[in-house]
Amino acid sequence: MSKKEIGFSSQFKKQFAMRQIDPNWNDVFKEQLPEEIDSQRRTAWKYIVNQLIEGKSIPSYFKPHPIHAKRKLIKQIKKGLGNP
């Protein structure tokens, strides 16, 4: 069984670090999910990352948000996925 890995760009790492220290994002990075959603009581961030790694669907409890990215980043993502 191969281990899946999520790679992060340097731009993502910078923005991620800024969001982790922003108190408005505490419910995503620090507060535990209700037991009805996650019996392991992980944070929303850890839960979603785990769902993506395991290839499972994300429950409707989580609202989708559009991703806003610059053209250069979109091009890099498409290239990484094998799309021209």
Image: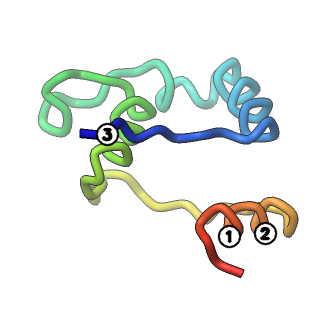
Q: Is residue 22 left or right of residue 38?
A: right
Please name the residue shown 61% across and 72% down the image. 82
Relative to residue 47, is residue 34 drawn left or right?
Answer: left
Q: Which residue is mark 1?
A: 78
Q: Residues within 10 Å of mark 2 (few under 14, many from 20)?
A: some
Residue at horizontal 52 percent and vertical 41 percent from the top = 6
User: Which image quarter: residue 84?
Assistant: bottom right
Q: Circles 2 and 1: CB distance less than 8 Å?
A: yes
Q: Position of residue 10 (x, y in %)?
A: 79, 35
Q: Amino acid at mark 1?
A: Lys
Residue pointed to by mark 2: 75
Tag of residue 2: 3
Viewer-side label of 1, 3: 3
Residues at discs 1 and 3 in contact (Cβ within 8 Å): no
Task: Point out residue 31 in the picture as x, y percentages from the top left corner.
Answer: 40, 21
Dot 2: element:
helix
Mark 3 vs 2, N-terminal side: 3
Callout count: 3
Regarding mark 3 in the picture, which secondary structure is present there?
loop
